[in-house]
Amino acid sequence: MKYEERTMFHHETADTERFEQVILLAVRQIINGATPQEFFAWAEVEVPQGLGLYDYGLDTVEIRRLAHLLATSIWNATPRPDQGFSLQPLPTPWPEAACPCGSGERYRYCCGAVDDLPELSSELIWELLLDELPERTLQDALASGAIPRPLLARLADRWLEQDRPGRAVALLEPLFAGSVADLDGDYEPAFDVLCDAYDRLDHWRKKLAFMERLGQEGGRALKAAAWQRRTTMYIDEGDFAGAQTAFATALRSDPDNPGTALLEITLLA
């Protein structure tokens, strides 16, 4: 990859919002049923304009290459609703074939020579899909188990905002039904939303039992989250000795947890 291209992607993609908007528009094309040919024809025009590639002094070949590479990354990472939410990655071209970006060069000397373009994860795309898919399609995705488990917290939080705490509980409780020792920090949002849903339903005994279990059996991040929440509860009750003890336990559980640092400021205040 040429220096100008590396600079554009690693330092000057300028504006993250612009980049995310291009990804969002591309994902919409895919989930609306675009074929690969239709999608790449769209990307050839819209990606350079959306990212402002013409402002970087790149030549036409470089712009086409960058647009095609990004479009390929998005296509390969996007679960297709019409294919059971499976990925449909494009086959890698034969090294001596003409590069599909349209540069006129052989693939091995063009897009095939690029090895430092960031790959997009399907989990990142799912974060967009949760806001894009209609309710019926989301239900199909839930039924198929296609949605990454940590991201169920976002869906449950939406239901909580819609005053549907029972539905949020039903969605999140299975995440913690088995062993919680291997659940990492990605599950902290699910823990928080589930506790909030218990509060809405006035299931305080269930919430306390859940927090105690995670505080004893969870991985480092979840142990810290459980004791952080217990600290906040003690502060609200005016039990500052209990809050100090719970805070010390949270700190021992995960010393580098950013939530613990914020909680220390609250406790000192």
Image: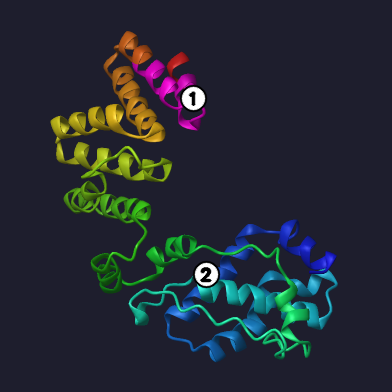
Q: Quadrant of the N terminus?
A: bottom right
In front: mark 2 or mark 1? 1
- Mark 1 residue type: Pro
Cα–Cα gap, marks 2 and 1: 36 Å
- Identify the magenta region: 246-265
Colour scheme: rainbow
* 33, above or below 137, in the image: below
If you read the primary sequence from the N terminus, does the residue marked by circle 2 or circle 1 appear first?
A: 2
Viewer-proximal residue, 14 or 11?
11
Q: Position of residue 75 (x, y in %)?
A: 53, 76
Q: Position of residue 113 (x, y in %)?
A: 74, 73
What residue appears at the point 23 percent right and 31 percent down from the top-left corner?
A: 213
The residue that disc 2 covers is: 24
Callout 1 secondary element: loop
Callout 2 secondary element: helix
Question: For this view, does 53 lie left or right of residue 30?
Answer: right
Is residue 248 inside the magenta stretch? yes
Instruction: Give the dominant element type of the magenta stretch: helix, strand or loop.
Output: helix
- Mark 2 residue type: Leu
Label 1: how many Cα within 10 Å (few below 14, some 14–19, many 20+): some
Q: Position of residue 138 (x, y in %)?
A: 30, 68
* 30, above or below 205, in the image: below
What residue appears at the point 15 percent right and 36 percent down from the top-left corner?
A: 202
Name the image quarter holding residue 70.
bottom right
What residue appears at the point 64 percent right and 80 percent down from the top-left corner?
A: 46
In the picture, the disc for residue 255 is 1
